[in-house]
Amino acid sequence: MIIMSVDFGDARTGIAVCGKSEMIASPVTVIAEKDFNKCIEKTAALAKEQRAEQIVVGYPMNMNGTVGERAEKCKLFAEELEKLTGCPVKLWDERCTTVSAHNALNVTNTRGKKRKAVVDAVAAVLILESYLGYRRNSGEST
């Protein structure tokens, strides 16, 4: 199944996708958009372009497991995206993915403007890799 992941942000939204084999998550792009509705529209257009059969949206729960303002905004984003695309959208716990993305970029010595441009797409890859691991381990990807 082609699955697209989204790391939604107020200014930049990272997008990643995997092919039908569900083996490799690859970064697609970062949408630089501050307008909530325009960001949803651009994300929906990418989902259609990528032929996504499912979309996973990062759900940034608090470290203690509670749902804060940011998670609520991501939930609304996911609901609106599902309405617009008609594609099933799943929320996926993304605690610490941005920190992990920064750590991965440290290893590759990616700095400055280039880092800012790709960190959200790397976070989307990490969200998708986590979800794909879950699918493999739970038998959901059969």
Image (cartoon, rainbow, N blue to C red):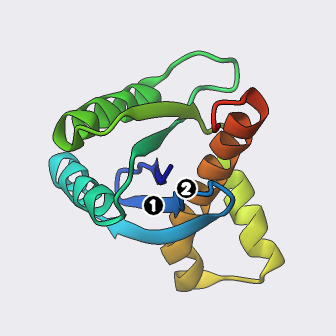
Q: Closer to the camera, 34 or 85?
A: 85
Q: Tell me the residue at 52%/83% (across/down).
A: 113
What is the x, y in percent for residue 119? 58, 67
Residue type at the position of mark 1:
Ile
Q: Are marks 2 and 1 in contact (CB under 8 Å)?
A: yes
What is the x, y in percent for residue 72? 39, 25
Q: Closer to the camera, 115 or 29?
A: 29
For label 2, the crowd category at 10 Å Cα-Cα, with few meaning under 14, some 14 to 19 and many 20 or more, is: many
> In this rendering, does residue 141 appear at all?
yes
| Residue identified by numbered label 2 | 124
- Mark positioned earlier in the residue sequence (2 or 1): 1
Label 2 SS? helix
Q: Is residue 2 above or below residue 59?
A: below
When asked about the image quadrant of residue 50, the answer is bottom left
Q: Tell me the residue at 48%/41% (across/down).
A: 56
Q: Is residue 99 above or below residue 108?
A: above
What is the x, y in percent for residue 95? 66, 37
Residue type at the position of mark 2:
Ala
Q: Is residue 141 left or right of residue 139?
A: left
User: Farthest residue toward the right?
Assistant: 107
> In this rendering, does residue 33 appear at all?
no
Q: Gap between marks 2 and 1, in whole Å? A: 6 Å
Q: Which mark is residue 32?
A: none
Label 1 SS? strand
Point out the image quarter for the C terminus: top right
Q: Is residue 86 above or below residue 2?
A: above
When asked about the image quadrant of residue 42, the answer is bottom left
Q: Is residue 90 left or right of residue 132?
A: left
What is the x, y in percent for residue 13? 40, 58
| Residue identified by numbered label 1 | 15
